[in-house]
Amino acid sequence: MGHTSGKDIDKIIANGGITWGRGGDSPNPNEGKVKTKAKKKKYITGAHGSGSAMQKAKYRQARANRHKQ
């Protein structure tokens, strides 16, 4: 264990103490990532070839166009 002088301890107290961990704000590493396949563009539009996804895409399109004149 290292030795600290009175000046070091005063400096630590004046600066708000000792903080353990990462300094500053770090960006969220998961920001912008898609967690499930169901939210990806190919699955929403039914472009990947699955019959059920194509049917769901048809329903989504009909719902989106329902109130458009």
Image: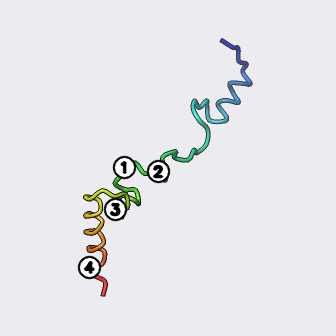
Residue beneath disc 3: 46
Q: Earlier in the sequence, mark 1 or mark 4?
A: 1
Q: Earlier in the sequence, mark 4 or mark 3?
A: 3
Where residue 57 sits, quadrant-wise, is bottom left
Q: Are marks 2 and 1 in contact (CB under 8 Å)?
A: no
Q: Residue furthest top?
A: 1
How far across and down, in percent of the image, does residue 52 sit?
25, 58
Residue 30 % position (x, y): 48, 46
Quadrant of the image containing the C terminus: bottom left
Q: Secondary structure at mark 1?
A: loop
Marks 1 and 4 in Cβ contact (< 8 Å) = no
Please name the residue shown 26% across and 73% down the image. 63
Name the residue rendered at 26%, 79% in the picture: 66
Residue at disc 4, secondary structure: loop
25 to 16, vertically: above or below: below
The residue beneath circle 2 is 33
Q: CA distance from mark 3 to mark 1?
A: 15 Å
Q: Colour mode?
A: rainbow
Q: Which is more toward the observer, 52 or 66?
A: 52
Q: Position of residue 39 (x, y in %)?
A: 37, 56
The Cα atoms of the two marked residues, 4 and 3, are separated by 19 Å
User: What distance separates the C-alpha of mark 1 from that of mark 4?
Assistant: 27 Å
Q: What residue type is disc 4 on?
A: Arg
Q: Nearer the viewer, mark 2 or mark 3?
A: 3
Amino acid type of the residue tagged 3 in the rendering: Gly
